[in-house]
Image (tube, grey):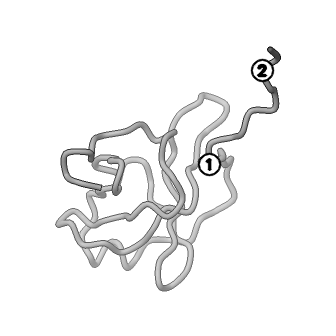
């Protein structure tokens, strides 16, 4: 993907495997899933896969979401100290296939 094709997206468009960066642009993880509070339909954060396993990044720690990456507000030290995810309401971030076929 060229820089010209890279643009901001909504959290609902995030794809598994999207790179996650520290505030200074260093990749440290990939997106595993998106968390949402279903009671109020609010973005809660993301679960990421790091070299040390799954970690939780709170929505307040997300600076921006792009087609190619997620930029956090975390330093490398803060990223290394992220907690493991707790039980929460997950939304599926993979696009669902239509169950309906068009009739001609």
Residue 102 badge: 2
Q: Quadrant of the N terminus?
A: bottom left
**For the residue carrying disc 1, how many other residues have a C-alpha within 10 Å: few (<14), some (14-19), or many (20+)?**
few
Residue 95 against residue 49 in the figure, above or below: above
- The residue shown at (80%, 26%) is 101
Q: Which residue extends farthest front?
A: 104
Q: Classify mark 2: residues with Cα within 10 Å, few (<14), some (14-19) or many (20+).
A: few
Residue 103 to residue 13: above or below: above
User: Closest to the observer: 6 or 53?
Assistant: 6
Farthest residue, direction bottom: 52
Q: Residue at x 69, y 58 (%)?
A: 87
- The residue that appears at 34% across and 55% down in the rendered structure is 68
Check disc 2 and report its element: helix, strand or loop: loop
Q: Quadrant of the C terminus?
A: top right
Q: How many marks?
A: 2
**In the shown orientation, is residue 84 left or right of residue 71?**
right
In terms of image quadrants, where is residue 19?
bottom left
Query: Looking at this view, is 25 or 75 the one in front?
Result: 25
50 sits to left or right of 103: left
Q: Quadrant of residue 91?
A: top right
Q: Is residue 9 above or below residue 69?
A: above
Q: Residue 64's x, y, as percent? A: 29, 47
Residue 81 in the image, given as x and y percentages of width and height: 40, 77
Q: Position of residue 63 (x, y in %)?
A: 28, 49
- Residue 85 in picture, x, y percent from top left: 59, 65
- Give the residue pinned by disc 1: 94
Q: Quadrant of residue 53?
A: bottom right
At 50% from the left and 71% from the top, the residue drawn is 83
- Taking depth in this image into account, of 39 and 17 the one nearest to the observer is 17
Earlier sequence position, callout 1 versus callout 2? 1
């Amino acid at each position: 993907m060229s820089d010209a094709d890279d643009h901001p997206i909504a959290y609902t468009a995030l794809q598994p495997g999207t790179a996650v960066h520290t505030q200074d642009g260093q990749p440290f993880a990939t997106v595993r899933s998106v968390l949402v509070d279903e009671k109020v339909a609010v973005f809660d954060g993301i679960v990421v896969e790091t070299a040390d396993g799954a970690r939780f990044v709170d929505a307040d720690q997300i600076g921006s979401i792009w087609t190619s990456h997620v930029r956090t507000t975390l330093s490398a030290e803060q990223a290394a100290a992220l907690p493991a995810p707790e039980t929460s309401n997950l939304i599926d971030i993979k696009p669902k296939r239509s169950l309906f076929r068009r009739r001609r």
